[in-house]
Amino acid sequence: MAIDEIEISRAIIDRYHEKLITNLETDVAIVGGGPSGLVAGYFLARAGKKVALYERKLSIGGGMWGGGMLFNEIVLQSEALPILDAFGIRYRRYRDDYYTADGVEAVGSMTAVAARAGLTIFNCVTVEDVMMKPDRVEGLVINWAPVEMAGLHVDPLTVRARFVIDATGHDTDVVRVVEEKTPGRLNTPTGGIMGQKAMWADRAESDTTQNTREIFPGLYVAGMAANAAAGGPRMGPIFGGMLLSGEKVARELLERL
């Protein structure tokens, strides 16, 4: 059978349209496709919840691809190993409580397993605003990331979610929108975004999970976004806390859903 170019285009458009329409209303919308976002998406989808993840970049995985300074090995502590096991990611003991895994394998495995569990991933999509009704986050305002990069005036679309997770890392993109545009205080010691502090890996790893919480009605923070919002330190290329944060936010949301 001859391959028809128009049928190729039709297949792509039809399937993507179906995926987009199906996810206009979800249980949870995750912004940011780094490790905490992927882990949260996996556990929520595995439990039967309808979950969509939006990543601004063409590729997902956040900082895991590059390990430390482009040495694509990541370090984790023993507490996070059950999560690696859940994704089928291989790891090796380095010494004491230090374990390493290949960053590329980790991202590839997490992406595949989460997608097969039911997580829908939209890449090259940016979140430029939130939906509020009246004092609770109820959804996202999305557009193509290239539209944002080019500075084009193109109106966005909206998606509704019972809960939103900001897993955008250091930038805290969704929390920042809420802080600037909505009345009320954030669930932080100051009531606002406190900003990321200098590196302190040990403290940052524990703070990441402790700071994972509902930061505004309907909006949770996970991963480095949780630390940056609450004024915690950065941790560098150790990823156990990021994975544990994703698991924690999924667990808390499952109790509420």
Image (cartoon, rainbow, N blue to C red):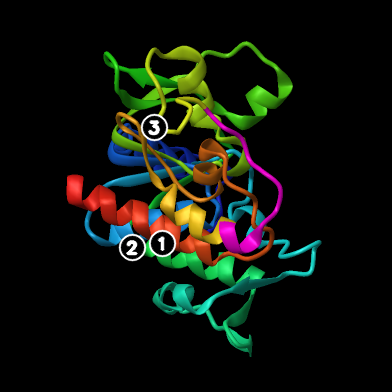
Q: Amino acid at mark 2?
A: Ala
- Crowding at label 3, few (<14), some or many (≥20) Cα neighbours within 10 Å? some
According to the image, label 2 marks what residue? 117
Q: Is 34 displayed left or right of 149 in the figure?
A: left
Left or right position of 44 against 145: left
Q: CA distance from mark 3 to mark 2?
A: 31 Å
At a point 75% along the width and 64% down the height, the residue shown is 68
Residue type at tag 3: Asn
Q: Residue at x 70, y 53 (%)?
A: 199
In the rendered structure, find residue 187 and report the number of the disc placed on it.
3
Q: Main secondary structure of the magenta part?
A: loop
Q: Secondary structure at mark 3?
A: loop
**Helix, strand or loop status at disc 2:** helix
Label 1 crowd (10 A; few <14 / some 14-19 / many >=20): many
* Residue 199 belongs to the span the image colors magenta: yes
Task: Identify whether 205 is placed above or below 57.
Answer: below
Q: Amino acid at mark 1?
A: Ala
- Give me the residue at 32% from left, 31% from top: 24
Which residue is tagged 1?
A: 114
Residue 127 seen from this side: no
Tell me where residue 2 appears, x and y as whole percent.
55, 56
Q: Are marks 2 and 1 in contact (CB under 8 Å)?
A: yes
User: In the image, 165: left or right of 149?
Assistant: left
Residue span colored magenta = 193-203
Q: Residue 52, how many percent across, how many down?
A: 38, 44
